[in-house]
Amino acid sequence: MNIFVAKLSFDTQSEDLQKVFETYGSVSSANVIKDKFTGRSRGFGFVEMDNDDEARQAIEALNGSELHNRTIVVKKAEPRKEKNQSRSRW
């Protein structure tokens, strides 16, 4: 399951996410998204867990928890929408 993690501290690294989520099961990847020009964190990331039960457990336990002095938002990632899909056509 792909998990979206938001409201991260700009100091949070991918390795930090991996460690936190490994408490709940096997993590296949953890990635803090960075600005392509500055290299600075954009304040959100994604964690991939192969076992859906472990992923649901992590979401339930970590949503609203604190990481690096920030209350984080953790939820199942939704498929990315195409940019043109959100525009109305007249």
Image (cartoon, rainbow, N blue to C red):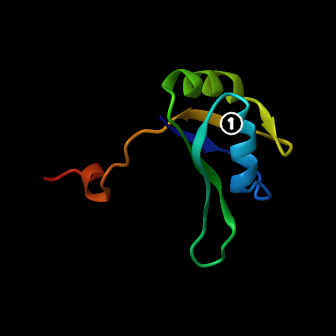
Image height of 56 relative to 88, above or below: above
Q: Residue at x 81, y 35 (%)?
A: 66
Local packing at callout 1 (Cα closer than 10 Å; few below 14, some 14-19, many 20+) is: many
Q: How many marks?
A: 1
Q: Which corner quadrant of the image does residue 7 belong to?
A: top right
- Residue in the foreground of this view, choosing between 17 and 87: 17
Q: Residue at x 67, y 29 (%)?
A: 63
Image height of 37 relative to 67, above or below: below
Secondary element under disc 1, as helix, strand or loop, is: helix
Where is residue 3 shown, x and y percent of the image?
54, 38
Q: Is residue 17 left or right of residue 45?
A: right
Image height of 36 relative to 52, above or below: below
Farthest residue, direction left: 90
Farthest residue, direction bottom: 37
Residue denoted by label 1: 21
The kind of residue on which mark 1 rests is Phe
Q: Which corner quadrant of the image does residue 71 belong to?
A: top right
Q: Residue at x 68, y 36 (%)?
A: 21
Farthest residue, direction right: 69
In this rendering, does residue 72 appear at all?
A: no
Q: Residue at x 37, y 48 (%)?
A: 80
- Residue in the foreground of this view, choosing between 9 and 27: 27
Where is residue 61 shown, x and y percent of the image?
70, 23
In this rendering, does residue 47 appear at all?
A: yes
Where is residue 51 shown, x and y percent of the image?
51, 28
- Residue in the foreground of this view, choosing between 18 and 35: 18
